[in-house]
Image (cartoon, rainbow, N blue to C red):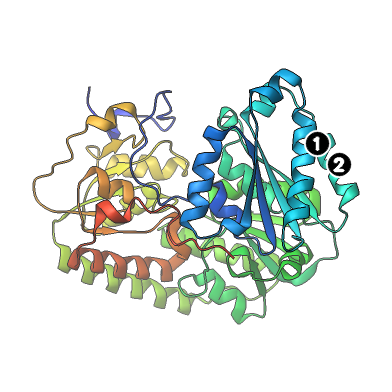
Amino acid sequence: MNEYQLIKDVTYEYDADIGLAYSSPCRGIWNIVHIGTQIPGCHQIYVCPTSCLRGVVLTTAEMHAMDRLSTITVGEDNILEGNMEETLHDGVVKIIQQLPERPRMIMIFISCIHQFMAANYQRVYGILRKEYPDIDFVDAYMDPIMRRKTPAVPSLTRQTYRVLQPAEHLASQVNYIGNWFPTEEYSDLTKHLRANGIDIRELSTETDYDHFKQMQNSAMNITYHKYASLAGKDMEIRLNQKWVQVHMSFDYDVIAQDMNHISELLKIPAVSPTEIQAQIQACEDAVKELKQLVGDTVISLDYTAVDEPLSLAYYLLKHGFNVESVFIEVFTEDEKVFNDLRALKPDLKIYSADNWNMRVMDRQHAGSVLAIGQKAAYYNNTNNFVDIIWSAGMYGYLGIQHLCELMRDAYLHEKDMPDLIQHKGWGCCAK
């Protein structure tokens, strides 16, 4: 069985989720522990069997953030005695009493066993909120059995902002929802909004809990990543905040359309055509210089590095690069992007990075490979790779120019791929 399919042989409805999966050594993508530590003043409590606790404890220890996490072990006796709810309540109370400082917010993560046993955990949270009115309790979930309905990262991204309540909105304040990396340096949208007096709130830069909660006063929520859509929709319904989803596209026109749409909604001047043309020219200069350097070097990329890998593949191919393969699980970009890419390079290889047969993939490659993303680097067995996840705060023309710089550096300087890809939570540090 081939590990890949040619894009000409797959449809837009392609979905690689066939059940049995292979977990590669690539650990750069953030998990629920990493996300929970981004909220200043938040303490996480995991209520799980011992085997489930092992992973979250190891992740927290690797981050040197054990003071931000507590655990409540669920065992067979809890199932036999039917005291799941009492164990949850009493364990949380004991943890609060023993903490050196009263946390402003507590995320309580229940696990699959609570779903199996139909535990009334919402009742427990109601009691805790009455007993500790000064603490914001948030229900969070570590239940992979629900991954088809509500995957862990989209679910927790939504729950992260559940502490925000309906409030008066400020026309000059907006939120970036679901961003774990600051967008100050490599985002045209950030640059444009700030130049027009818009205050941007994003969790990646928050260091104070009260300041974080002021996000409820924003007039608009902007999401870049697909996993943040659940949060954007939820906040639009609960808080009556306008939700706008931008495309993490490499299409110059799409970038301009998204930025000008947001400008229109905020009643600020659109990005001037002169500025757009200047940035497009800067992109063209950067990509031309990169192409002269890398020549016909094989390029491979994956979905963990950028949100729209098909758009990036199309952009690079249109500029003459030798893009050979894309590692992806499901197509989430506009169908037009897929169709344009298939027409441009029908023999583009599409790999399912998590498919069971990838464990025996022949990772040797004739010639050098420049990879974008950890999975592309691992499966192509190359040390020349761009080590990023989730676009790393890059957006728009400035993002394209910076990605060219990262590709240039990756081509010229090898990294220790086997070591780097095993580090959990790329770029994450606890607050």
Q: Locate the C terminus and report the quarter of the image it occupies.
A: bottom right
> What's the amino acid at mark 1?
Gln
Residue 122: which numbered mark, if any?
1
Percent x, y for residue 292? 16, 68
Q: Splitting the image into 4 quarters, where does residue 268 fall?
A: bottom right
Percent x, y for residue 74? 65, 31
> In this rendering, would 3 be left or right of 174?
left
Q: Residues within 10 Å of mark 2 (few under 14, many from 20)?
A: few
In contact (CB < 8 Å): disc 2 and disc 1: yes
Q: Locate the N terminus and report the quarter of the image it occupies.
A: top left
> In this rendering, would 251 be left or right of 194?
left
> In this rendering, would 42 be left or right of 22?
right
Above or below, 225 against 148 in this view is below
Kind of element beneath mark 2: helix
In front: 6, or 259? Answer: 6
From this viewpoint, is residue 223 visible? no
> What's the amino acid at mark 2?
Gly
**Residue situated furthest right in the rendering:** 130
Measure the C-alpha gap from mark 2 to mark 1.
6 Å
Residue for point 64% across, 69% down: 206
Kind of element beneath mark 1: helix
Q: Splitting the image into 4 quarters, where does residue 18 fall?
A: top left
Residue 126: which numbered mark, if any?
2
In front: 67, or 107? Answer: 67
